[in-house]
Amino acid sequence: MEISAAKLKLQISRTLLYVFLIILAVLCIIPFYIMIVNGSRTNVEINTGVTLIPGSNIIGNMKTILIITANINFFMGFVNSTIVAVCATTLSIYIASLTAYGFVFYEFPLKKVCFGIIMASMMIPAQLGLIGLYDLYLRMNLLDSLLALILPAGAAAATVYFLRQYIRSVLPEYIIQAARIDGAHDLSIFHRIALPIMSPGIATMAIFGFVFNWNNFLLPLIVLTTEDNYTLPLMVAQLNSSLYARDYGAIYLAVALSIFPIIVVFAFLQRFLITGVSFGSLKE
């Protein structure tokens, strides 16, 4: 009887957990679904209120976007955003991984002070450094270039902190020591041993980094002046200008299309996240 009662209690707990997760998933999906639905509706239908039933004007909104494309090169914005997001995420992940690896397995003077400075920088709003960053780019002749959007990603304090904690939990020091005894060089150990083990944590931060760099609006707005260098968020924002402000259906559809690459990246990297969860569950 006690065993049956325990099994029943466990079953009820699992059922409640699944119901909670389903409700949470629905709450996360509804905003995106409404955005896609509004992308298929007309302005009159959108102004009538929110609905979950798709409209019939998706072709008309697509034609509107194609007409606007004659003045706004969305394809170039897509290419620019892809270049910035991929390069910035790669730079951020590599430098942060190398930095976190060094903080875990190396001893050097003022190690704790340096890590404290990195942690303190997380409490400073990034907007406070925009004036100094603009002045630096002006002196380096980097204004109005995609490189100006990629370089700041190399200083990702939050990524360093996360990967430092992740390395300490999944990568024992005796593995590094064994590789050194076998004669492996430090960079070889990092690339061939540490990086593969760190891949689930790297995938997690890569998703956040890609989403941030893809959606970044403030920095491109400040440093970019030529429309050929505009990223996709700047071009989508132009749809909300006085010329296209009333065509909300086209705006919703353009925004829905702009998040498609984010979904693709998440679908590609989620297998690494699952691997990380499985690895953590089997770790002694």
Image (cartoon, grey):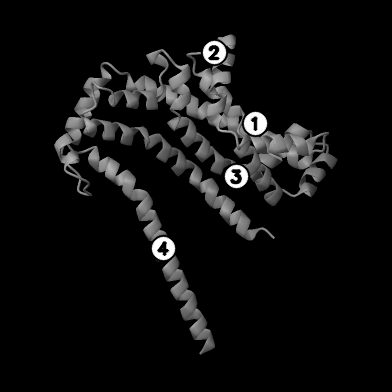
Q: Separation of disc 1 and disc 4 at Cα?
A: 38 Å
Disc 4 residue crowd, few under 14, some 14–19, many 20+, Cα 10 Å: few
Q: Separation of disc 3 and disc 2 at Cα?
A: 32 Å
Which callout, 3 or 2, points at the residue further toward the start of the chain? 2
Q: Secondary structure at mark 1?
A: helix
Which callout, 3 or 1, points at the residue further toward the start of the chain? 1
Which callout, 4 or 2, points at the residue further toward the start of the chain? 4
Q: Residue placed at 28% from the left, 27% from the top?
A: 240
Q: Which residue is mark 3?
A: 201
Query: Residue 242: x percent and y percent?
Result: 25, 22
Disc 2 residue crowd, few under 14, some 14–19, many 20+, Cα 10 Å: some
Q: Separation of disc 2 and disc 1 at Cα?
A: 21 Å
Q: Which residue is mark 4?
A: 20
Q: Does residue 252 sit above or below 65 in this rendering?
A: below
Q: Residue 82: which quarter of the image?
A: top left
Disc 1 residue crowd, few under 14, some 14–19, many 20+, Cα 10 Å: some
Identify which amino acid the numbered label 4 is placed on: Phe
Instruction: Say the numbered circle drawn on residue 142.
Output: 2
Q: Which residue is mark 1?
A: 95
